[in-house]
Image: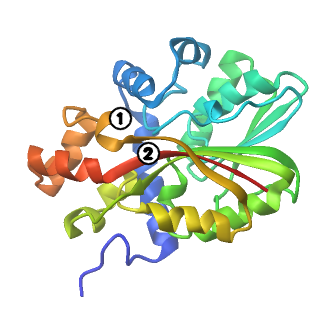
Amino acid sequence: MAETARSRDPERLREEVREGYTRVARGGDAAVAREAGRRAGYSEAQLDAVPEGANLGVGCGNPTAIDALCPGETVLDLGSGAGMDAFLAARQVGPTGRVIGVDMTDAMLEKARENAGKAGVTNVEFRKGQIEALPVEDESVDAIVSNCVINLSPQKDRVYAEAWRVLRPGGRVMVSDIVLDGPLPPAVLESIEAWVGCVGGASQRDDYLRTIREAGFREVRVEGEASFGGLFPPDDPRVKEVAERLRLSDDDVERYTDTVKSLHVFARK
């Protein structure tokens, strides 16, 4: 039987995702990324506030807008990338607060640290690690944010178990993530390109929310949602590239992206 993205060993899959995001970190178009940021829900003021190069245009929402962050809080960003949401969180928690970004891709960490240095942001640090095994102490953070990253994990139950472990009692999770409202064709589910593009690894909506509850979280609720097609329209160059590789027609792309949703989820420990 041919190996597919979903049948790969989790560590091998992580390595392929890491390679894909290394390419994202080293490439990209600033204008395309800014437009993607607008569609995802970032204000012009927020897009202007982050260091140049922090917005890579790969998010599916604005997790820092799901619930207010307070001065002095400690915030953890899962899959922090080039630092977009970490820098926005740092502005909200102020000089008495701190933000920890965790990412498994060296190129992303290098870019995020460079961005922090250029912008003079001192209340953010970026650590290398996997979101299934966080390099963070027990009950040490007040809030967790994440943007279109947990769907990439083949072990989402471990991610939310780790989130529970590192949160203080009463702490909260604010996540923008990709889920499915129906089946996708095997060509998409079996493609590593679709996985890196945040679709191939997505869970069905009910399964995703159940995973959060089974980790122990309460007040689990969807604060908003959008279709993937609204975030990444068929003429987006990244969508076109994946569609060409998978030999999908424009009608296929439109039909399948209506099945994919970006959820903005809140939960409390």
53 to the left or right of 188: right
In the image, residue 188 above or below residue 54: below
173 to the left or right of 242: right
Q: Mark 2 highlights which residue? A: 262
Distance CA(mark 1)–CA(mark 2): 9 Å
Identified by mark 2, the residue type is Ser
Q: Residue at (71%, 29%) from the top-left corner?
A: 89
Q: Position of residue 156 (x, y in %)?
A: 57, 66
* Residue 197 visible somewhere in the drawing: no
Q: Residue at (36%, 18%) from the top-left corner?
A: 31
Q: How is the image coloured?
A: rainbow
Q: Are marks 1 and 2 in contact (CB under 8 Å)?
A: yes
Where is residue 123, by image quadrant? top right
Q: Quadrant of the N terminus?
A: bottom left
Q: Secondary structure at mark 2?
A: strand
Tell which of 244 and 232 is nearer to you: 232
In the image, residue 214 above or below residue 19: below
Q: Position of residue 131 (x, y in %)?
A: 64, 58
Q: Residue at (52%, 63%) from the top-left corner?
A: 208
Q: Position of residue 9 (x, y in %)?
A: 46, 77
Tell which of 129 and 198 is nearer to you: 198
* Residue 252 visible somewhere in the drawing: yes
Q: Position of residue 159 (x, y in %)?
A: 64, 63
Dot 2 alpha-carbon crowd within 10 angstroms: few under 14, some 14 to 19, many 20 or more: many
Q: Mark 1 highlights which residue? A: 231
Where is residue 169, by image quadrant? bottom right
Q: Residue at (26%, 63%) from the top-left corner?
A: 184
Tell which of 150 and 130 is nearer to you: 150
Q: Secondary structure at mark 1?
A: helix
In the image, residue 31 above or below residue 245: above
